[in-house]
């Protein structure tokens, strides 16, 4: 472990600089604006070069396309007095330290017509006026998209290419699976929207520069015997030259601005920007600021190629440490300078938001881009990797309080020190929502169980929400499938039918009316097998479409594996080629199994299976006593109370799901992994589902991640024990355990108990397990959340932890806001649940 030089790990001397305060204010005031630059450039190029007519778009085709975009996009340098026009005008003195931008806008909304960008087409005129998360765009931009962009992509998006191919080949199975996907209630298959969920390898770009990557590609191309490999290496060189050209354009732009700048200090800063962009990322970074600039420019380039939904930056405290510590030792920068640079970098990362149509906002809205950064943990040798930069990054996040990047901290109970864990808990208390904390011991075990080399597993970073993947090696698409487990339960209850699609139609397979709990579990397993078959088959089909029309030369150039294999990531070029499903509704389904086991199938059960089904169909109308019985943890076993029977049903689900998915191979030759994090989908799926046997009413939210159902776990220690005992080997794509603590006046005592609760949760002696895998928090009083729900404009910066990521509370839809308000809240001083009535949605009556 590098020596920690700080005597006070909280770095109290570091504060937000005036520059950062100004930029942060502008960040929150800015209204996101649709950017038409990228779609217009790629559409024109694709039209002029016949790419729309090609059955197969080669990686060299794509590399030339992206180089064209990089050479012709606007070289944005935000520096000087600025004024934004649009829905919210504001003035600011913008003295950013990093040139470049994800889009041409101050806070942009990038569009990808190759994916689901066309879903915004019907809404272009109404986007600026919609109630939830409006996007500004001018009338001229609307006309551009209407006439010059969207019409050309009507049959060329990933989804439509897939649909056409299925029709052309008479593949009715895939057509039916696409129809199943579009019903929304069964699963989401995100390859129609992106792949994204992965971590590039920035280490070579920082330490060697992109010119070294070009030279390596040229050498390998000259030695290649296979034409496909030769084409791959040429594509790498072309793509990297595009990024270098973009950086040079930024350098020229900054120099032009410096030549016109009257203020000496501003002129000096612009000249520095010009000099830095003239050197990196082409050449090795010689300073901490140059290393950050290298990553930033490469990051913007990656976003030209991939929609940013879960693209993550990895272990930056490891990648950047050498340049940081060199600058500190040589007195090039101070710790305060480093914090300012990181805050500016954080703000750049958040310079865009995903394009979400109004239907998506209603069901799943409020998510950012979920760009994860990972800190701490152990290194490839198993030694302590926490360093000075780890604490500097924690301080920057604590001060800036932004939703992006999504900060994740690794902690190894046997290697990392108590002082480090205490600092992680302290930052959570001070921000109210970040960072998430991951148990290295459990995560590394989960990854090696799935075949990862030990050194690779130790070098994991967090992708998107909470998904672990070997840093820059694992092309895992951790959100390939988002499966509604409650729909599997529904198909079991109604013998292959679903209330959302009508009980007169068999959707899956008929499994009959079970007469024993074992028979019910057998039927559930059969329905789950059917769902796994549908989802993996469709994901593999979409993957084949990507292989033919959407290769990724930029990301492949910034990854471990493709340069050795001479193969694009989408073809299997990565060192690790997994895919993953995340499961929504685990706790509700597990508690439903317990309810059925106890009250239907056990000897002396209080009702028959048909009676249970009838009550569910009626949403417990006239059966309130039954609903209360099913929901009561004193009468019905509930996950999260350290109840052996309830927790065993969770373990059975985890093992069954993991087994069925891991049996499947993906289109790149890897295997499927499984995680339990839900973004906002647990609220969205809940709105589409009827009542369930655990006493949940129709349209109510499901529970997030791997968290027990809200309101049924009175004791914190028992809840933590129930989750921690679940075997890590079944959780290889990560979990989100969401807890909510009430702020307390005695901060020191609260912090000590906070640390103790995390250590207890990560304890490996619990039932001979690896301990809990992940834990994340909201530390907010309920009154604040309720006030923010009623008066969102009064709380524009309120940061909350959703299920794997942070969000601004005001951006969440009412259903998701209610879910966070109603989550079980504990008081650490007592370890007990605080009782609250459910928060009413607009139009609902508050319960007495």
Image (tube, grey):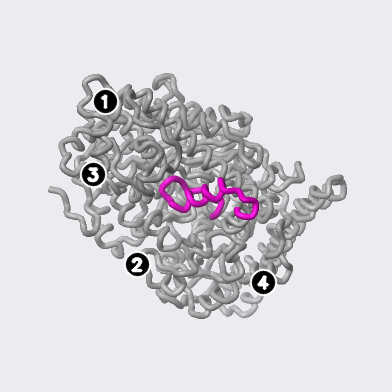
Q: Do the residues labelled 3 and 4 touch (CB within 8 Å)?
A: no
- Front-lying residue, 598 or 809: 598
Mark 2 residue element: loop
Residue 509: image x %, image y %?
45, 37
Q: Considering the image in quadrants, where does the N terminus appear?
A: top right
Which class describes the residues within 10 Å of circle 2: few (<14), some (14-19), or many (20+)?
A: few
The residue singled out by tag 1 in the image is: 598
Residue at 36% across / 64% down in the picture? Answer: 132
Mark 3 residue element: loop
Q: Are marks 2 and 1 in contact (CB under 8 Å)?
A: no
Residue 749: image x %, image y %?
28, 36
Of circles 3 and 1, which is in front? 3
Residue at 45% across / 49% down in the picture? Answer: 395
Label drawn at residue 22: none
Label drawn at residue 618: 3
Asked if residue 226 lies left or right of residue 419, the reply is right
Of circles 2 and 1, which is in front? 1
Label drawn at residue 131: 2
From mark 3 to mark 1, how far is it between C-alphas? Answer: 21 Å
Q: In this view, does 490 lie above or below 243?
A: above
From mark 2 to mark 4, how far is it between C-alphas? Answer: 33 Å
Mark 1 residue element: helix
């Amino acid at each position: 472990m590098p020596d920690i030089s700080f005597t006070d790990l909280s770095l109290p001397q570091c504060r937000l600089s005036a520059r950062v305060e100004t930029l942060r204010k502008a960040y929150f005031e800015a209204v996101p604006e649709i950017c038409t630059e990228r779609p217009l450039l790629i559409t024109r190029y694709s039209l002029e070069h016949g790419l729309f007519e090609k059955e197969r778009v080669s990686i060299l085709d794509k590399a030339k396309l992206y180089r064209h975009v990089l050479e012709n996009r606007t070289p944005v340098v935000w520096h000087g007095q600025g004024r934004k026009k649009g829905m919210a005008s504001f003035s600011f003195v913008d003295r950013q330290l990093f040139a470049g931008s994800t889009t041409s806008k101050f806070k942009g909304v990038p569009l990808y017509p190759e994916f689901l960008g066309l879903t915004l087409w019907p809404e272009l005129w109404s986007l600026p006026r919609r109630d939830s998360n409006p996007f500004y765009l001018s009338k001229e931009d609307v006309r551009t998209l209407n006439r010059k962009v969207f019409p050309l992509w009507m049959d060329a998006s990933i989804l439509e290419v897939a649909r056409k191919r299925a029709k052309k080949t008479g593949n009715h199975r895939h057509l039916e699976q696409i129809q199943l996907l579009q019903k929304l209630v069964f699963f989401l298959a995100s390859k129609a929207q992106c792949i994204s969920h992965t971590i590039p390898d920035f280490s070579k770009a920082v330490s060697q520069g992109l010119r070294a990557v070009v030279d390596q590609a040229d050498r390998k191309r000259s030695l290649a015997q296979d034409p496909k490999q030769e084409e791959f290496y040429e594509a790498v060189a072309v793509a990297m030259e595009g990024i270098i050209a973009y950086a040079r354009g930024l350098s020229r732009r900054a120099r032009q601005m410096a030549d016109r700048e009257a203020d000496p200090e501003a002129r000096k800063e612009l000249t520095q920007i010009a000099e830095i962009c003239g050197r990196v990322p082409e050449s090795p970074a010689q300073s901490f600021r140059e290393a950050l600039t290298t990553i930033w420019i490469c990051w913007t380039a990656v976003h030209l190629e991939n929609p940013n939904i879960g693209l993550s930056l990895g272990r930056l405290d490891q990648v950047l440490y050498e340049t940081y510590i060199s600058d500190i030792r040589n007195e090039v920068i101070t710790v305060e300078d480093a914090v300012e640079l990181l805050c500016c970098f954080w703000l750049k990362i958040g310079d865009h938001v995903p394009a979400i149509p109004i239907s998506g906002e209603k069901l799943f809205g409020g998510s950012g881009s979920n760009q994860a950064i990972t800190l701490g943990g152990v290194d490839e040798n198993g030694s302590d990797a926490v360093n000075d930069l780890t604490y500097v990054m924690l301080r920057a996040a604590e001060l800036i309080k932004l939703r992006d990047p999504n900060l994740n901290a690794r902690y190894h109970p046997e290697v990392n020190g108590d002082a480090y864990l205490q600092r992680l808990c302290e930052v959570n208390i001070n921000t109210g929502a970040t960072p998430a904390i991951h148990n290295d011991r459990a995560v590394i075990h989960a990854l090696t169980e799935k075949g990862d080399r030990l050194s690779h597993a130790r070098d994991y970073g967090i992708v998107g929400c909470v998904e672990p993947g070997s840093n820059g090696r694992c092309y895992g698409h951790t959100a390939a499938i988002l499966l509604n487990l409650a729909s599997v339960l529904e198909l079991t209850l109604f013998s292959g039918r679903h209330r959302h699609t009508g009980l007169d139609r068999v959707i899956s397979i008929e499994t009959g009316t079970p007469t024993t709990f074992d028979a019910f579990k057998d039927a559930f397993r059969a329905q789950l097998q059917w769902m796994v078959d549908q989802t993996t088959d469709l994901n593999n089909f979409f993957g084949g479409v990507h292989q033919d029309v959407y290769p990724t030369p930029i990301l492949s150039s910034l990854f471990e594996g493709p340069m050795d294999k001479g193969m694009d990531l989408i073809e299997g070029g990565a060192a690790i080629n997994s895919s993953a499903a995340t499961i929504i509704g685990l706790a509700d389904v597990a508690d439903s199994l317990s309810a059925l086991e106890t009250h239907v199938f056990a000897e002396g059960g209080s009702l028959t299976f048909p009676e249970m089904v009838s009550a569910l169909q009626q949403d417990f109308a006239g059966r309130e006593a039954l609903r209360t019985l099913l929901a009561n943890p004193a009468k019905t076993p509930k996950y999260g109370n350290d109840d052996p029977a309830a927790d065993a049903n969770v373990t059975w689900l985890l093992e069954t799901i993991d087994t069925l998915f891991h049996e499947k191979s993906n289109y790149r030759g890897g295997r499927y992994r499984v995680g339990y994090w839900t973004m906002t989908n647990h609220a969205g799926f809940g709105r589409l589902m009827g009542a369930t046997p655990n006493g949940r009413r129709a349209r109510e939210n499901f529970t997030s991640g791997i968290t027990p159902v809200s309101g049924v776990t009175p004791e914190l220690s028992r809840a933590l024990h129930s989750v921690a005992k679940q075997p890590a080997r079944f959780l290889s794509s990560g979990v989100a355990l969401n807890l909510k603590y009430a702020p307390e006046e005695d901060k020191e005592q609260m912090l000590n108990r906070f640390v103790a609760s995390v250590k207890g949760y990560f304890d490996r002696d619990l039932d001979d397990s690896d301990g809990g895998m992940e834990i994340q928090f909201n530390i907010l009083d309920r009154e604040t959340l309720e006030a923010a729900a009623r008066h969102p404009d009064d709380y524009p910066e309120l940061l909350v932890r959703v299920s794997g990521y942070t969000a601004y509370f005001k951006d969440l839809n009412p259903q998701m806001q209610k879910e966070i308000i109603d989550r079980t809240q504990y008081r650490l001083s007592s370890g007990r649940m605080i009782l609250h009535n459910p928060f009413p949605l607009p139009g609902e009556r508050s319960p007495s």
